[in-house]
Image (cartoon, rainbow, N blue to C red):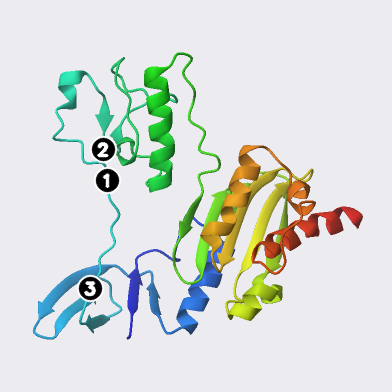
């Protein structure tokens, strides 16, 4: 099967760490995926052979294929809910809520994609739990997105937590970077999935700023860091925790070991 991808931006996955997103792009291209960046589609035509996609610039490029998938994202579908009748404020992004997820109506809370935030099922569940708690119990709690983790389920997977390196630079943070390749992980080598890396961003004292994993079952592996960040653990807390051998989780521990080497030098 031949797959061609057109993207009107200069790279894939613009909300993920650039280094790992570019690594993933190279991997997919090596696997045979044809990736065209900085291309905007002008015309899509269906004929007896399938579909033909043409670009709207002067590059004079078009591609044909049997199947077509268009990924444009989504937005909150709230226009027909008659929210004005309940005095609920909203805009094109969705229903407006405060940090307690309460709407402009004193007895109505909202959660999930309709409030226009992170559009992930696990984030919607987190918001729903808080909204129900605040609706039924006193002493309203504020939403804590816990670093807003997510995973792009490509092969290999790309998992994201907290700040990217680009965001650390933009914020002027004094940060450290620690990496560990899956090429040196015995479990990954045994399973033939030894591609990608763990990348951890911390403060000088080891507080977690961001964690990004490109590799086998990255969506499972990131959860250890989600808990660590929520509990305000430091990178050496993970490094000092025994990880079972041989597992992919050892790559996480090996990455944290780099912090000890950094301090030792």
- Quarter occupied by the C terminus: bottom right
Q: Secondary structure at mark 1?
A: loop
Residue 40, located in which quarter of the rendered image? bottom left
Query: Would residue 247 be visible to someone looking at this image?
Result: yes
Between marks 2 and 1, how big is the CA–CA gap? Answer: 8 Å
Is residue 227 shown left or right of residue 99?
right
Q: Secondary structure at mark 2?
A: loop
Q: Do the residues under discs 2 and 1 have CB atoms within 8 angstroms?
A: yes
Q: Which residue is mark 3?
A: 68
227 and 149: which one is in front? 227
| Residue at the spot 41% in from the left edge and 34% down from the top edge | 127
Q: Which residue is mark 2?
A: 92
| Residue at the spot 8% in from the left edge and 84% down from the top edge | 48
| Residue at the spot 29% in from the left edge and 37% down from the top edge | 114
Query: How many numbered discs sit on the rendered protein?
Result: 3
108 and 169: which one is in front? 108
Label 1: how many Cα within 10 Å (few below 14, some 14–19, many 20+): some
Q: Which residue is mark 1?
A: 75
């Amino acid at each position: 099967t031949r797959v061609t991808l057109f993207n009107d931006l200069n790279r894939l996955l613009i909300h993920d760490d650039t280094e790992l997103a570019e690594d993933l792009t190279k991997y997919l291209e090596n696997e045979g995926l044809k990736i065209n960046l900085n291309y905007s589609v002008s015309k899509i035509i269906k004929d007896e052979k399938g579909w033909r996609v043409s670009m709207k610039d002067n590059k004079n490029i078009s591609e044909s294929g049997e199947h077509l998938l268009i990924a444009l994202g989504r937005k909150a579908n709230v226009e027909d809910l008659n929210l004005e009748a309940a005095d609920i404020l909203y805009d094109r992004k969705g229903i407006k809520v405060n940090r307690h997820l309460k709407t402009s109506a004193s007895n109505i809370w909202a959660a999930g994609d309709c409030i226009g935030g992170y559009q992930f099922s696990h984030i919607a569940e987190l918001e729903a739990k808080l909204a129900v708690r605040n609706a039924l119990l006193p002493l309203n709690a504020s939403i804590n997105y816990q670093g807003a983790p997510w995973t792009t389920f490509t092969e290999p997977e790309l998992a994201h937590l907290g700040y990217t390196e680009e965001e650390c630079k933009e914020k002027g943070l004094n940060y450290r970077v620690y990496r560990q390749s899956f090429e040196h992980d015995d479990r990954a080598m045994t399973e033939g999935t030894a591609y990608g890396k763990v990348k951890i961003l911390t403060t000088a004292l080891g507080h977690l700023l961001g964690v990004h994993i490109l590799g086998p079952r990255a969506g499972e592996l990131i959860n250890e860091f989600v808990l660590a960040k929520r509990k305000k653990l430091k990178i050496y807390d993970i490094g000092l925790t025994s990880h079972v051998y041989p597992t992919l989780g050892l790559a996480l521990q090996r990455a944290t070991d780099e912090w000890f080497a950094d301090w030792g030098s």
